[in-house]
Amino acid sequence: MIEHILIPTDGSSAAKAGVEQGVALAALLGAQVTFLAYAQSLADQAGVLQGGCMVDNRRVDQAICAAAHQHSCDLIVIGSARTPAKGLFTPSSCARRLAGEAPVPVLIVH
């Protein structure tokens, strides 16, 4: 059962899609949400510092994995821009690495 969802965001339109879908899924499941902001100014704007965390100097995908572990999350929901490759949806390199390295399932939203 999914009880805690980590939603990383950098404020991009792709990330916003991940935030919207992650929040909707959390509401449907009655799950807690933790936001992970990539930048101090974004965290301040979103007002998520109390209920979220910040990425430090590690690679973003490594920081997301660490945050999922630290906050005991069951799922990561991340937005990813469409990268054209022979007409197929190809996730960004960060989302692709995250899907292979994360300690929990990853839902990639586009």
Image (spheres, rainbow, N blue to C red):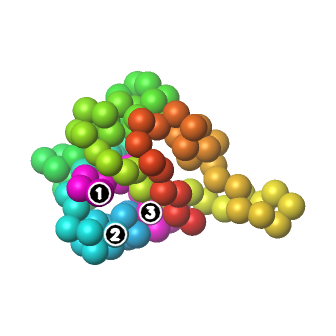
Residue 89's image quarter? Answer: bottom right
Query: x%, y% of residue 20?
Result: 38, 70
Q: Are marks 1 and 2 in contact (CB under 8 Å)?
A: no
Residues rendered magenta in the picture? 1-18
Query: x%, y% of residue 104?
Result: 41, 42
Query: x%, y% of residue 48?
Result: 21, 52
Residue drawn where x is 22% and y is 61% of the image: 31
Marks 3 and 2, how far apart at CA? 10 Å
Query: Is residue 24 rendered to the left or right of residue 85?
Result: left
Residue drawn where x is 64% and y is 53% of the image: 91
- Residue 1, numbered label: 1
SS for callout 1? loop
Q: Is residue 108 above or below residue 62?
A: below
Amino acid carrying label 3: it is Gly
The residue beneath circle 2 is 25
Residue nearer the viewer, 71 or 15: 71
Amino acid carrying label 1: it is Met
In the rendered structure, does residue 3 fall within the stretch colored magenta? yes
**Pointer 1 or 2: first along the chain:** 1
Residue 80's image quarter? Answer: bottom right
Amino acid carrying label 2: it is Leu
Residue drawn where x is 52% and y is 40% of the image: 98
Q: Is residue 27 above or below residue 59?
A: below
